[in-house]
Image (cartoon, rainbow, N blue to C red):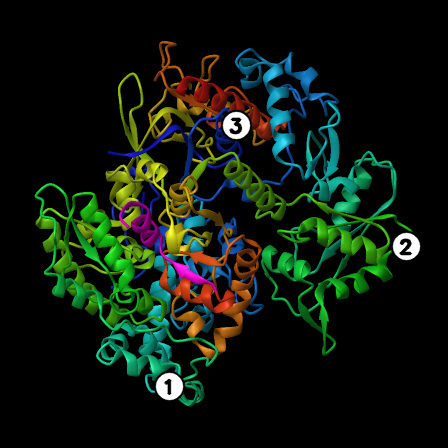
Amino acid sequence: MSDARDPTEFDPIVPNTGEEYEPLEVFPESGSFDLRPGADSCYKCSTCDTNCPVAEVDDDFPGPKFQGPEQWRLKQTDDDYVIDSSISECSNCLRCDTSCPSGVNLAQMHNTARGEYVENQVPKFSVKYIRNRILANYRTSAYFASMLPRTANFFMNFGPVRWAMEKVLHVPSEREFPEFATQTFRQWWAERGGAKVHSDEKRIAYFHGCYSNYNTPQVAKALVRIYEYFGYEVMVPEQKCSGTPMFANGMLDDARRHAETNVESLTAAIEDGADIVASCTSCSMALRNEYPELFDIDGIDDLAAHTYDAVEYLRIHTDVRQELEQAEVSGELAEEFAYHAPCHARSQGLERQAIELFRNLDGVEIEDVGDSCSGISGTYGWKSEKYEKSMEIGSEMFEHMEDSGGTTGMTECPTCASQMEHGTGYDIRHPLELIEAALID
Amino acid sequence: MAIESDVLVIGGGLAGLSSAISAAREGADVRLVTYKQSTLRQASGLIDVLGYTPDGDGPLTDPYEGIDALPEDHPYRIVGVDTVRDAMSMFDEVVDTYQGGHTDTNALLPTYGGTVKPTARYPDGASAGLASDDRDLLLVGFEAMPDFDAPHVAAHLRAAGVPFDVRGVTIQFPGELMDDAKVTRYAKLLENNGPVTVRGRERGARDALVERINPELEDEPRVGLPAVLGDDDAAGVRAALEAELGVDVFEVPATPPSMPGVRLEDRLFEALDEAGGNFESGNPVVSFDGQDRVETVYVDKQDARIPFSADQYVLATGGLVGKGVESDRERVYEPIFDCYVPHPEDRYDWFDEAVFGEHPFAGFGVDPDPELRPLDAGGSPEFQNLRAAGSVLGGYDFAAEKSGSGVSIATGYHAGRIAAQEAQ
């Protein structure tokens, strides 16, 4: 036994990529996360590659197996190795992560490689870097826009402004900018006087994220009303961006800064007896999965263990499924929904919960439009050089939506929603809005 | 509280899907949870029932006849030959894109390795490739896809004594695909007749491929290609190629990752959806509550434990390769419920010294009662409401017998049906 671990302690049941596995030093100390166990678990079956929506349409993209385990190995054996620029073509959908039969942490490998690439190889004064940084920090733009929402709505979709954005920042003028609400969710919450239900036993803290605060407060309000209907006390702690768009753009320092605030304020809510729920599946994914994979912040594991998707939490703790089977929807939401499961919902095992909950709900129809990726992947489809690719990836979903019965879409992810709307012209709703319509309205 | 259903199936491979579909067709509220994506992505797409006896005799003409001669503890003997037949009928009903159900006789199909394999069901797309068909054939491989080396496969088939002339040629796939372009890339280009650049001109990939195959054809009435002919609409891709080439076109069943496996996975999940079943993937079942009965199982999402409870459970987590059976230096065990896995005490008795010898580990798995409930060391069911299906079961060597798919379908069907009946 020279340089390897004692094999009698080796426990192959648990995907051996967690912190518990500590190989003796074989490769030099790097100060960053040790990704070797993941690289060693990869046996090159290429299942990840068959799941990659980018490799399916892009002839230059070498696929997740290369980006993750192989690139990591190349780095270990060649001191001069620089991260391949193709890492910036990865859309961070994380499908590879869900597919790996060996539990290789491809998402973590991709995020660290991308962070390193942006840090060391992308000039900080390049247009791309500046554009990506603006896109990644959506919360900042949204914060300013929400001060004058009507003006912002006008200018963000005003032809000449968008022409200039395309020319200067390479933001595709084809895309419609999401509308800013005239009253943010937090303003509504404050005006309402906070929680209407108080309980020591049943308490959740809501991570609303940026989008349902600034753009779709109706989703956030639906969440509050549903949880209060089931007797929960809702807390709305201080929070910043979950970091998803920052991981996807390799801006790990920005993401960490926001994560520090979130971890501090959400762990305080956990100490007050709350579990954390999010209505955006990329936000819950970030808190659950990416935080502990990428950062070492006090309480971060505790936060991951207490975070749930808002609908998932209702499925575990309430009779929502039985109540919906008895309920009926009429009015505006009595529709046929074309449901798309976001990739980040898929990796949390939530890809079918909307179908399950609504398939027996009177007054509505729901159809799963299949397992293709919507193609937008957050900020990915907001870059001129990736717009066409994003639409090509999405084409399968658009076709399936058009083949479905109605003209209303449904998804949990705000950027998937904007892609669905962009590709089909459908109105897109969140499952929480339908639960609200069924049980409360 | 917990997320509830009548029947909870753990595992998303062929056994898990078969049990979930059979339970849902019995009217139970079914949920399937799978740690990762279905392992069908790594399967050839062929459905074997029994190709060889445990002594290596074969290929067998009729797999059902061979079942009687199997040892008593073989899963086929435990569920009985009639159940195997019923299970295959269910498969034929839900997967309408497969052939072979018209006869009890095994079909013989060429593989990527150039061997000829006995199998009970095969995808429509492979049917023009039958080795029992005496028409001459041309195999066409692509340069950048070394898994399928057409001249080598042709030479092997000739050596195997197939009753026809076979040639293999390697051509360049049109367009400048990278050397390790994914099977999904080929499939998508062919399905959409997507644009590729050929000598500076933009062409449809399918049209350009036809032009490259045409000059290679002599008078063979059938052409075999790597299994990348489309994804959602494989039949359409094949029909278009056949119309242009004027010959029958087939796919040779593939090595992983495999488009025929992906298509079968898609079809079976659709069938589960149509039968009203629910499913989710991405996270493992790691623990449970219960003594005589399994009360609740826990799915691990990062560190959050998500509780799922059901009246009846089916364990379809796979064998030693699929991680449904594990081993360390001390013992062989089933990792979720710690069901008893019979095995010799000395680990040097777990394997044979010859690489291709008769390895005892190939038959490791839980030992079930006639209802497929895993038994403890004393011969009593470990739990009243837990049944096992597929390669988590012991007593057979699917690789040697060519029985993997059939055992998964038969035991899955049996376990799912009993679970649904018990739950009602």
Between B15 and A140, the one nearer to me in the picture: A140
> Which region of the structure is painted magenta?
A426-441
- The question of residue A189 being in magenta is answered with no
Chain for numbered disc 3: B
Name the secondary structure under disc 1.
loop
Q: Nearer the viewer, mark 2 or mark 1?
A: 1
Which quarter of the image is occupied by the N terminus of chain A? top left
Q: Amino acid at mark 1?
A: Ser
Residue tagged by mark 1?
A: A126
Q: Residue at x 87, y 48 (%)?
A: B221
Q: Amino acid at mark 3?
A: Arg
Q: Amino acid at mark 2?
A: Glu
Name the secondary structure under disc 3.
helix
Between A313 and B189, the one nearer to me in the picture: A313
- The question of residue A440 being in magenta is answered with yes
Where residue A108 appears, as percent x and y from the top left, is 34, 58
Q: Quadrant of residue B344?
A: top left
Residue at mark 2 to residue at mark 1: CA–CA distance: 57 Å
Residue tagged by mark 2?
A: B218
Q: Nearer the viewer, mark 3 or mark 1?
A: 3
Where residue B227 appears, as percent x and y from the top left, is 67, 49
Q: Are marks 3 and 2 on the same chain?
A: yes
Residue tagged by mark 3?
A: B25
